[in-house]
Image (tube, helix red, strand yellow):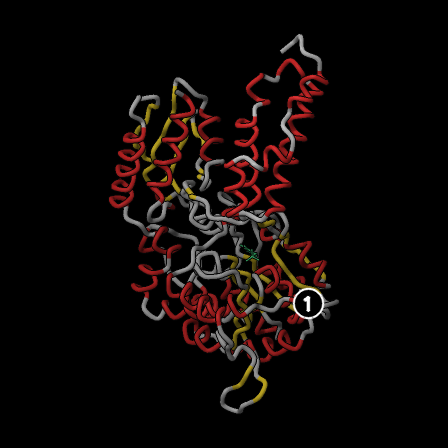
Amino acid sequence: MPHTSIQDLMRRIPGVDVLLHTDALQKSLGTHPRKIVLDSIRHVLEETRKRLRENTSQITEEELQVNHIVNHVIQRIEDLSDYTLRPVVNATGIVVHTNLGRSLLPREALERLQLIGQGFNNLEYDLERGKRGSRYVHAEAILCELTGADAALVVNNNAGAVFLVLNSLAQGKEVIVSRGQLVEIGGSFRIPDVMRASGAILQDVGCTNRTHLQDYAGAIGESTALLMKVHTSNYRIVGFSSEVTLQELVSLGQKHEIPVIEDLGSGSFIDFRPYGLTGEPTVQHAVNAGADMVTFSGDKLLGGPQVGIILGREDLIARCRKNPLTRALRVDKMALGALEATLRLYRDEREALLKIPTLRMITMPLTTLEEKAEELLAAIRAADAQECLDMEKVASNSQVGGGALPAQNLKTWAVAVRSDKIATQRIETALRKSRTPIIGRIESDRYLMDVRTLQDGEVEIIQEAFRKLIKSIL
Ligand SMILES: *Cc1c(COP(=O)(O)O)cnc(C)c1O
């Protein structure tokens, strides 16, 4: 509308009252708070005025019409009404995906959350004695039962667990760690930084690729409080390299009466070697080898809620428990309830592999994955009546994620999609922004969905998103 003046156009923008009295927005008032509806109207009007001022010639006659503006307002109302934390479809194939919330809880744990959340409970009440008790007793017995440890303490997360152990046992004293294990995990957790923050003094020994027992032995002195081993989680040193085993470190520690701690990171209760996955030590192995303290996450390979688990010697756990920081890192009742339910499944390994989603996804047979890929392919094909897309089932690799088993590629099946009509990047964006966001990846200019991490009912969600995308192309 190049020949109309701005003022003239501004006058044509409908007012708040006019919009509010449209049937559509009257209906919105029935289902949404008045404030949200009004804020949305004001927001869309302000946007429209701004666009007019900035670029008058870009605005079409249609955009100033009541219907058009009402549609925008309704979109805005929907955006404002959405939860910010909401479900997404994980089509990345990364099972323990920290950005997508890590482990999915087993049904047994979800039922527990409901039960613990809706009523009172004995979180800190001793039912035997009828007085105040400790929240830390709840998961302890089963953790000791499953791992053979003497004592256990559950805190908010594993970063907190490591921090608490270092602060309780080594404040102002030295902790000996191999240079090859001074790792950074997920950006904000770096062993040297955690050490400094905890008040412990890092004494790094050996070289990046090789550390020997005598390196540790040579560094032991008056002020050595701990020998520490860190599972390097998210990377591997390959080639000319060597690490001191936990057993060797334990013997050295015993000789000098210095406790040995191991940060396992993922902390698996299952030996994955029968499934062709190597390099992930089990928690039981670390306890058996004689580590005085072991720390690991609840929501990585364990497949439970976010917690940090400390196992170890009774006297050392007692020192952690007495530390005032424990209060700051304390675990909540929901996490404790879900943890206990998850741990109980480990009493029967077959049951754990079936019922814990993280384990089920990691050990899913290739034939099942291929069937899932065929199902997804058929569903997208059915949504693509006009044949806008090229698609096929492709063999690919998934990752466990969460720093676990980093050198392992799990063979998987995926569906790859591209189109002559729309850039692959736009396919990715459209799916990510759909009602239930779908997170896949782009590889060789194709949009790839790994079926390993798809849950029940999500094929239909993806199909619907493709239906919408195709409609928008045509
Ligand atoms: C993941 C990880 C952590 C941090 O655990 P959170 O549960 O994320 O707090 C610490 N150490 C290692 C080796 C890890 O892999």
Q: On the picture, is 162 further left or further right than 289?
A: right
Q: Read off the residue under disc 1.
A: 167
**Residue name at image x 38 percent, y 24 percent:** 418
**Residue name at image x 45 percent, y 55 percent:** 103
Q: Nearer the viewer, residue 415 or 316?
A: 415
- Which quadrant: the N terminus? top right
- Which quadrant: the C terminus? top left
Image quadrant in which you'd find residue 293: bottom right
Q: Nearer the viewer, residue 443 or 127?
A: 127
> Which three-letter amino acid code belongs to the residue tagged 1?
Asn
Percent from the top left, x then y, of residue 335? 51, 66
- Which residue is outermost to the right? 172
Q: On the picture, is 271 further left or further right than 323?
A: left
Q: Is residue 42 above or below residue 185?
A: above
Q: Is residue 90 above or below residue 227?
A: above
Q: Residues within 10 Å of mark 1 (few under 14, many from 20)?
A: many
Quadrant assignment for ligand 1: bottom right
Q: Nearer the viewer, residue 260 or 169?
A: 169
